[in-house]
């Protein structure tokens, strides 16, 4: 199988040094960029037998026409070069981030002679200092409006500024005290830059220091009987405190940190970043990541950090805090620490929050990431265009005569071969039809394939032949003919399903299996699966249907276990419904109750030692 890659270099030709490698297609486009401590050891993993590779990796290497590598001196240089090439070539098989340009930022143009404060969603302007992002546009407008009372930085456009300068007439903001009006010479350019610097210092996290300076100024003015100045300073303090009240205090110290939460599944990941400056949450960002190749959490962390802190060409350097908190440390922890410290100019610590307030905030970031991933899937499922594209994609991939408007999916669940149940879920036009779901209890079976055969046989008897006009089922919903049958599993399961179709003599049905490990679509009797492209609507829909069938089967299996043990307990003399409910509530599951000792059972309210012994004997028999 490995010989199918005609461009494979000889093992001895691949160096053992650290380096960066690139997979290229026939046109020279870079498909994937990776780094390695040992190039020979890393690339050898790609050149093993193709059937031993993960499906997504196999698809990448079979799409390639060449592999090239560049030797570097250290792992740190490999890390830097990898990040540079990923930004330059944007390879399709590397992690893909869906940008968050919709977030508004508070920005100050420090590159201008007369700096200007403004609100923008463009994160790539040169010579600009950014604060945020803010989750709501009104929040950043309120913040800017309040701060201009204390730090009257210019906020007008260049055109307005030049007209005011030419006419020697300040605009309304200058008249009401929300601009120092450098255009008409009320302050010099140097004085205005000093105001802009104070604005930056406050937003960067020097909250306490600024307030203390202003309070001292207010007291001095009051003692000197400069009451108007004292009143203005008091108003400035109140304005700044108003801004601070809107920023949640999370730490008692002046913590500067970025916290990341990551929630992922086989196809995508959601990232939530909490930006903490001066001990307060200054901004929250979020991304959805499409995973082209299989990625574990440490790898995702590495590429998230790369995406956040790598400066794009023509943009200002990204603010790197003193501390970066991540769910897990990547393998290249030391190199990443060094890279981040070089970007910051001083030491940066990359670590996992273990306890206290930081761990609590990291947990909040993870909760936000989980919600974002769920929302991403929900919105994608609810989108009519995406559903139509998914059904059309399935039709094309499986060579169906028409789009599968009704899809039924079957899954089998059991606990160690006991309590075998199965589920059937129905999706019409890409949406779940929960009123048409069905559950099956399987009394006698040998394995999963036999269970699939039994379930499909029972379901198919309700499908009348198009030539037979006699209704078989009083429940007409169960008699609806599916466009596509899906079973959870690989080739053995789908062959068992096809055997049930053949034996039932129902004509014109198509069945496929979706194998969870590699997300392959299997058709009966075929040696190779259908591979749906990653991050496509058709694969997303099939996965969602399969996962729903799995959820429904698991739920039924747990209900059966619970009702079974409740029935056993109910037969014990002196054990009524309330005591049974108390036992199940106390132990949480039938498995824990069966494993409990008589002493542990007797600790439940209303259960004495003698009754506890009877319970143990009944459950062990």
Image (cartoon, rainbow, N blue to C red):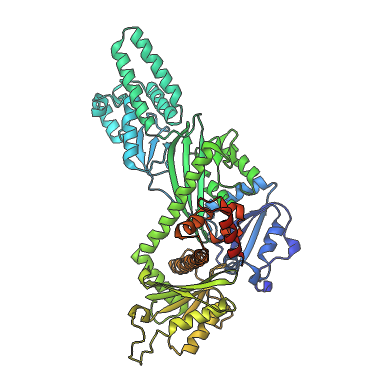
The residue at 48%/81% (across/down) is: 456
- Give me the residue at 40% from left, 79% from top: 483
The residue sitting at 35% across, 63% down in the picture is 383
Residue 168 seen in render: no
Q: Between residues 393 and 239, which one lies in front from this camera angle?
A: 239
In the rendered image, the vertical position of residue 349 relative to residue 445, given as above or below:
above
Image x and y of residue 290, in percent: 49, 58
Query: In the displayed structure, does residue 234 sit left or right of residue 263?
Result: left
Q: In the orientation shown, which residue stands out farthest toward the right?
A: 12
Position in image of residue 375 (x %, y %): 40, 55
Q: Is residue 75 left or right of residue 294?
A: right
Residue 473 visible from this viewpoint? yes
Front residue (pair 269, 110): 269
Q: Quadrant of the C terminus?
A: bottom right
Question: Viewed as shown, does residue 66 lie left or right of 259?
Answer: right
The x and y percentages for residue 461 are 43, 85
Considering depth in this image, is 101 or 598 the residue closer to the camera?
A: 598
Q: Which image quarter: residue 197?
A: top left
Please identify the quarter of the rendering in which residue 105 is found.
Answer: top left
Location of residue 272 with respect to 4 vertically, above or below = above
Q: Quadrant of the N terminus?
A: bottom right
Query: Where residue 185 sits: x, y (%)?
Result: 31, 21
């Amino acid at each position: 199988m490995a010989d199918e890659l005609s461009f494979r270099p000889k093992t001895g030709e691949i160096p053992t040094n650290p380096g960066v490698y690139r997979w290229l297609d026939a046109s020279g486009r870079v498909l994937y960029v990776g780094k390695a401590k040992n190039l020979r050891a890393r690339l050898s993993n790609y050149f093993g037998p193709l059937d031993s590779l993960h499906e997504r990796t196999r698809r990448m290497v079979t799409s390639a026409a060449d592999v090239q590598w560049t030797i570097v001196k250290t792992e740190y240089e490999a890390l830097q070069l990898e990040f540079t090439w990923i930004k330059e070539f944007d390879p399709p098989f590397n992690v893909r981030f869906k940008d968050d340009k919709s977030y508004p930022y508070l920005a100050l143009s420090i590159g201008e002679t007369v700096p200007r404060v403004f609100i923008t969603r463009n994160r790539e302007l040169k010579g600009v200092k950014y604060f945020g992002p803010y989750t709501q546009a009104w929040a950043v407008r309120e913040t800017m409006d309040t701060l201009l009372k204390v730090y009257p930085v210019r906020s007008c456009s260049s055109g307005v500024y030049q007209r005011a300068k030419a006419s020697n007439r300040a605009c309304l903001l200058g008249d009401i005290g929300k601009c120092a009006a450098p255009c008409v010479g009320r302050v010099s350019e140097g004085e205005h830059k000093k105001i802009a610097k104070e604005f930056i210092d406050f937003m960067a996290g020097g909250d306490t220091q600024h307030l203390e300076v202003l309070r001292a100024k207010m007291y001095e003015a009051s003692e000197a009987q400069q009451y108007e100045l004292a009143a203005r300073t008091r108003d400035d303090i109140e304005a700044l405190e108003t801004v601070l009240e809107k920023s949640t205090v999370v730490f008692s110290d002046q913590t500067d940190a970025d916290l990341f939460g990551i929630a992922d599944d086989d196809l995508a990941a959601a990232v939530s970043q909490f930006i903490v400056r001066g001990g307060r949450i200054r901004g929250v960002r979020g991304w959805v990541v499409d995973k082209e190749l299989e990625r574990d959490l440490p790898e995702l962390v590495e590429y998230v950090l790369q995406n956040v802190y790598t400066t794009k060409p023509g943009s200002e350097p990204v603010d790197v805090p003193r501390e970066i908190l991540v769910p897990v440390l990547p393998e290249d922890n030391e190199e990443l620490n060094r890279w981040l410290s070089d970007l910051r100019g001083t030491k940066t610590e990359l670590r996992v929050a273990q306890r206290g307030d930081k761990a609590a905030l990291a947990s909040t970031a993870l909760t936000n990431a989980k919600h974002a991933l769920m929302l991403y899937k929900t919105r994608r499922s609810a989108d009519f265009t995406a559903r139509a594209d998914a059904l059309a994609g399935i039709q094309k991939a499986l060579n169906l005569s028409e789009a599968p408007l009704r899809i039924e999916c079957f899954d089998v669940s059991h606990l160690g071969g006991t309590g075998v149940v199965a589920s059937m879920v129905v999706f019409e036009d890409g949406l779940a039809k929960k009123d048409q779901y069905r559950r099956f209890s399987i009394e006698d079976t040998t394995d999963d394939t036999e269970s699939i055969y039994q379930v499909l046989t029972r379901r198919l008897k309700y499908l009348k032949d198009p030539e037979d006009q006699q209704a078989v089922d009083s429940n007409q919903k169960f008699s609806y003919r599916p466009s596509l049958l899906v079973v959870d599993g690989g080739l053995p399961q789908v062959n068992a399903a096809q055997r049930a179709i053949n034996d039932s003599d129902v004509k014109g049905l198509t069945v496929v299996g979706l194998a969870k490990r590699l997300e392959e679509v299997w058709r009966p009797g075929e040696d190779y699966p259908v591979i749906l492209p990653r991050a496509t609507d058709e694969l997303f829909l099939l996965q969602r249907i399969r996962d729903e069938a799995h959820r429904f089967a698991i739920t039924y299996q747990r209900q059966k276990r619970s009702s079974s043990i409740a029935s056993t307990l109910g037969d014990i003399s002196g054990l009524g419904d309330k005591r049974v409910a108390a036992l199940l509530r106390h132990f949480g599951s039938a498995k824990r109750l069966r494993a409990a000792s008589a002493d542990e059972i007797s600790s439940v309210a209303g259960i004495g030692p003698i009754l506890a012994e009877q319970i143990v004997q009944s459950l062990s028999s």
